[in-house]
Amino acid sequence: MSHLSFEEAVQERVDEMVDACTRCGKCIEVCPSVKPAGIADAAPVDVIGGILDILREGQGLEASRKWAQACTLHGACITACDEAINPRFLLAMARVAMAKTGNDLPARRRQGLERYRDVSREVAMLSQLQLDDQVLARLGQKPASANVTNELPDFVFYTGCNVLKTPHIALLALDIMDALGIGYEVMGGPSHCCGVMQLRSGDVEMSGRMGTSSVDKLAQSKSGEVISWCPSCYVQFTETTLPALERQRGARPFEMTPFLRFLAQRLDQLTPHLRERVPMRVALHRHPGVSGVVEAAIKTLQAIPGITLVDLKQPAFGLQGVSLSVLPEFKRELTRKELETAREAGIDALVTIYHSEHRELCAHERDWPFRIVNLLELVGQSMGLKQHDRYKELKLMQDADQIVADCADLLAIHALDAAKAREAVVKGMLADQPLPLRDG
């Protein structure tokens, strides 16, 4: 058991990586953000040298600062490093260092709290506009006292926060585990925050408090394994929080496995349940930031009878859809090109993996000759499982007043203020459109 504080444990890892870095520049050479960030002409050794300078409380080169801010959490840098350093983690900590030089701790803490509250309000409102109390309870959104059981579950299924905006995806994950006889308890939402909002604001101490509190809740299963859905939560826990806690406590409280990797590991168990043919030509919208997830998604799709997987031969970038928002013009062009290529390929559906790109892409279904569906919808269809994509149905209306009116029954059930609901719809649903629809 160490006497290190959380922030000291994080800093110790940073210092070790900084000392181990040889400045070879391989992480910059493989990074897909370099060109769209406008730093392709900078020498890789100088760019990584500038990152190390920032981490040592210096200013760093302008190109280094741009590189840190343009990180889409793609992850190619991790496998490119010969020194077992995690450059993606170092870039996150460089952004923390930059935030610290720009604001004092009270300002950073306020910013982190405001971001957390914004996410909490949006998640609560958009999920309540789609679900009644019984279904919200199934997703773990109920008082903690009601979750207490005498026996530990086999696994904990951790939703994160934002998938609750598109709850049909999370519900399908639960339906699939139920069908496979997997015992689990659901945890997630703002009450189980990973702390990433606080970290992005430069408040490492509060990020540690939030993350540690959630880790202690999640570390309650027979298997010692947490099945996770959200990729940004996965990166936050596995690359920042859990390694820091391991230094503080001497051991990791649990291992974390992305849901699709968990599912692909049980493909022999899943395949007999894939009884219905799904005769569709589909293409996969890919983000490779979490190792093995795209490969697991492909294996799962190929196991569904009737599915023909079409490779659009488009580049795959970043951790998830929202991660590319640091390069908005680049992201728009990527999306436009993928939609155009999908149309030319004559596919029936463009298949998303995560929730953030599903939110961003689903309304394009209105303007293109193919559907936008999540991978779990196709798995569910073959298994005879169905969860309605209410989020897409609402977003396709493209009218905040109409959306709120269509949710009048749930507004009443949850005693929600219509004006606040409309604000959440405008900001959290209709504005979540990186590539505008064809009518703008």
Image (cartoon, rainbow, N blue to C red):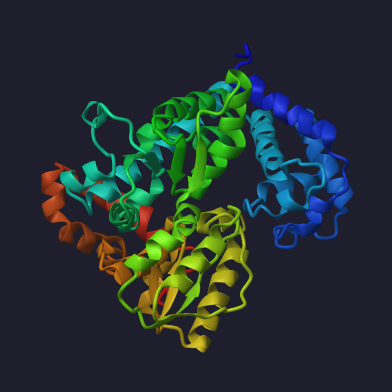
The one nearer the camera, 230 or 321, is: 230
Q: Residue at x 64, y 70 (%)?
A: 315
Occupied quadrant, residue 341? bottom right
In this rendered view, identify the residue nearer to me: 34 or 273. Answer: 273
Estimate the x, y position of residue 385 in percent, counting from the top left.
Answer: 26, 64
- The relative height of residue 265 versus residue 369 in the rendered view (above or below) is above
Q: How many numbered circles are shown?
A: 0
What residue is shown at x 77% (from left), y 58% (from top)?
30
Q: In which quarter of the image is the C terminus?
A: bottom left
Left or right of 259? Residue 8 is right
Residue at 80% in and 31% down: 58
Q: Position of residue 81 (x, y in %)?
A: 79, 48
Q: At 22% from the left edge and 52% from the top edge, which residue is drawn?
A: 129
| Image quarter of the N terminus | top right
Does residue 55 show up? yes
122 on left or right of 283: left
Residue sitting at the far top? 3
Residue 202 found in image quarter: top right
Whether residue 132 is situated above or below residue 148 in the rendered picture: below
Horizontal side of 127 relative to 259 (left or right) equals left
Q: Where is residue 427 in the image (x, y as percent from the top left)?
A: 37, 52
Please indicate whether residue 20 sits to the left or right of residue 229 in the image: right
Horizontal and vertical percent position of residue 20: 83, 35
Q: Quadrant of residue 426?
A: bottom left
Do we see residue 426 in this rendering? no
